[in-house]
Every structure is written in C-alpha cells, then in structure tokens.
Amino acid sequence: MTERRADLTFARLASTVLAPFAAGYFMAYLFRSVNAVVAPDLVRDLGLTATGLGFLTAAYFFGYGAWQLPLGVLLDRYGPRRVQAGMFLVSGLGGLLFALGRDETTLAIARGVIGLGFAGGLMSSFKAIVIWVPRARVPLANGCIMACGGVGAFVASAPADFLIQLIGWRWTIAILTAVTFAIAAAIFTIVPEKPGSTPPITWRDQVRGLARIYSDSFFWRVAPLATAHCGFHLAFQTLWAGLWVRDVLGFERDSVAIRLALLAIAFVAGSLLGGAIADVARRRFGIGVLNVMKALVVVFMLSHLALLFEATRSNMIVWLLFCAFGQVTILVYPVISEHFGPALAGRANTGLNLMVFLTAFAFQSVFGAILDLWPRMAAGGSDPAAYDRALTIFLAIEAATFLWFLVGMAKEKPAA
C-alpha cells in the first residue's frame, strides 16, 4: 500500500482519485438535497400531501442507511473503484425511474434506489483516500471531499431551481442522471485498481464486530446525540427548510431558493469551522473533542429554539448558525474510531451511519405527518402552527439526547 502511494504524484492523485470521488460525493449530496426545490412541483403535479412528500423524499435516507453495513464488506473485498462505479449505476437507474415516474409509489421507490446507490458516496471516497493518499495529506483530502458535498447542496438550491423553472423538474432530474452515469464511467476507467493488502472482512466478522459495537456502553452514550441531531438536520435542511421559508416567512419561490443557497454555504463553512475549532482547542488548550462538540451543540439548539419565535425566526444569523452547526455531532466519529481502535473503527462508523440515516428517514417522514394534522392554508401550504409543533417536538428529542449524553459522560471517561 505504501508503494502504491509513493507511485502516484499529487497531480495524479488529484486527477485519478480525488476528482472522480469528489464529483461522486457532489452528485450524491445534490440528489439528497434537490427535493427541497423540486417539492412545490411534486405537490402540484402529483397532488402530494405533506406526509406523502416527506415519505417520498425520506426514501433516499432509507436506501442510503440500509446499505451501510453491506457497504463496508464490499469495499474491503472489491475496493472503492469497482464498488463506487457499480453503485452509481444503481443510482442512475433510480434517477431515470424518478424522471419517468407518474405516481407517489414509483417516485418513492426511485428515491430509495437513488439513496442506495449513493450510500457509498462518502465512505468509498474515504476508503480511496486511505489507500492512495499519503497519510500527511489525508485530512486535506477528506476536507476536499466534504467541501464538494457542500457544493452539491449549494447547486441543489438556486441553480437547480433556475434549471427546473427553465426546463421542468423531470428534465432536470434526467440531466442529473446522465451526469451520474458519466461519473460512474469515469470512476471505473480513471481510478487505479485497489492494491492487494490485508484479507477482506467476512460477513461473519462484520456481524461479530457490530455485536460488540452495539453492546458497548460508551457507544450508546454518544450515538443517540449524534443520531438525533444529524438525523433531524438532514431531514429538515434537505426538504422542510425550503417549505418552512415559504409557508412561515412568506417568501416567493426565487427568494426561497436564494435562502437555501445561503444555508448551503453556511453548512459548508460550519463543517470546516467545527473541525478547525476542535483541532485548535485540542492542540493548544487541551480541550477534548467532545467538550467542543457540547458547546457547539448548545449553539445549534439555541438557534433551533429561535426558529419558534416570531421575533427571531427570520433573523439570518439564526439561520446561519442553525445550518452551520446542524451536523456538528459528526465530531463524534473520530472519537468513536479512537474508542474502538483500528480493527473496529470502520464498522463502528458505518454502524453509527446506519442509525443516523434511518433516523433521518423517520424524522423526515414524521415531520410531514405532523404537518398534515393541521388543515392546509388557502394558498396550499402548511399551517405555520404545524411547523412550530413539529420543530418543538424535535427540539425536545434533541434536548433529551443531549441530557442523556451529559449524564453518560459524567459516568464514563471517553477516549477524547
């Protein structure tokens, strides 16, 4: 493995490893988020309720989460090149089905297939980086991949909405599908083959490792917090944020798309800032990652709370903080890796990923069901009171998991 790393110059690494996988994660995040601007068209064309829209969109998270456990075994056996290329073909088929679908069931199945195919978007990228990128440059490479995901979220806002209004949502999805097929071909033809190294993990090893992870007390102290916070933020920002801005703040479609674009930028900046704060706090002041995360979680929950009050809900600073630190509990991933050690780190992270994305699926679906408990407004949107109730319920869940985390950390000394 070291020899393979030495054989590749940085320029070749960038062109044959980083660029193809970064493009893949960009597309995965674009598809994940695009329903936030497609939603009004889906409601108009298919007559969807909020429950139906939530379930349809959330199917992406179900497919994404359900495939996390097999993904680790496949990556170890066949390498990121073949796995990612093959799975992107699956996403492309899902995108084609979505573009052609004429009913709610078909579109929900299509979203699930898209999510399943993109399930390796990030993990395959990280696997490729571990194989080919020099260790000193792994953090930089990982940051580049994550940033490209944020760019995908940005493109899924105002730019995607412009294209939808120009050619329609079906043709927009068709174009994204064609790009997905092209990226699959690029990954398969450009990325180097995985060098032979350690024996692959078997399915039995996978199950045994997960049994150990899911029976670990430290895991169950931190996992609910990460699951609730990441799950809610994914569920809200990739669908309900745009509709909330329209129905509660009264923004027109173009203004909604611009607001979503700004929130996507805040998400990228916050992801980088959270990691930087944790790094500086640990190196210079000896403050553990989990203590940094606690402080930033409080900032996020306060911004969530501010969305419930008319005096603060339209404040852009509140929204920027909400989106910047909505995923801050990803800081727990390296802590979990350190806790379980190299042999189980990958399975521990995919085990947590499974919980996060299945929770996002449930939260996005339930949010829509809560909205449907109130009569729809004359303009066709959901009642602002319904949004307030949904946001209150999920804030209570976040607070409960945060309290559970604080109590647990008082009893256990983590590895960070």
Image (cartoon, grey):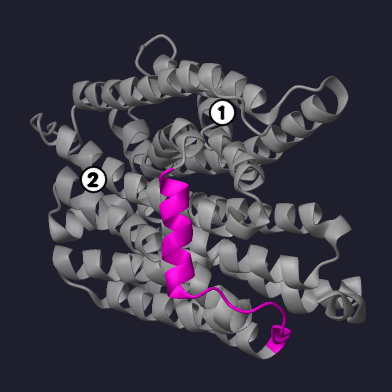
Q: Position of residue 289 (x, y in %)?
A: 68, 30
Q: Which tag is nearer the camera, tag 2 or tag 1? A: 2
The reply to whether residue 359 is in sight is: yes
State the residue at coordinates (73%, 31%). 278
Quadrant including the N terminus = bottom right
Q: Earlier in the sequence, mark 2 or mark 1?
A: 1
Mark 1 is on which residue type? Answer: Leu
Q: Which of the pair 332/51 is nearer the observer?
A: 332
State the residue at coordinates (28%, 31%). 247
Q: Which residue is mark 1?
A: 320
State the residue at coordinates (76%, 79%). 16
204 within the magenta span:
yes
Q: Residues within 10 Å of mark 2 (few under 14, many from 20)?
A: many
Q: Position of residue 110 (x, y in %)?
A: 28, 70
Quadrant including the C terminus = top right
Element class at badge 1: helix
Residue 303 sits above or below residue 15 on the image: above
Query: Which quarter of the figure has residue 101?
Result: bottom left
Q: Are marks 2 and 1 in contact (CB under 8 Å)?
A: no
Q: Position of residue 220 (x, y in %)?
A: 43, 36
Query: Which quarter of the figure has residue 130?
Result: bottom right
Mark 2 is on which residue type? Answer: Ser
272 within the magenta span:
no
Q: Position of residue 282 (x, y in %)?
A: 79, 28
Element class at badge 2: helix
Q: Which mark is residue 365?
A: 2
Disc 2 from disc 1: Cα separation = 24 Å
Residue 36 sits above or below residue 220 on the image: below
Which segment is the magenta one? Answer: 190-215
State the residue at coordinates (87%, 24%). 284
The reply to whether residue 159 is in sight is: no
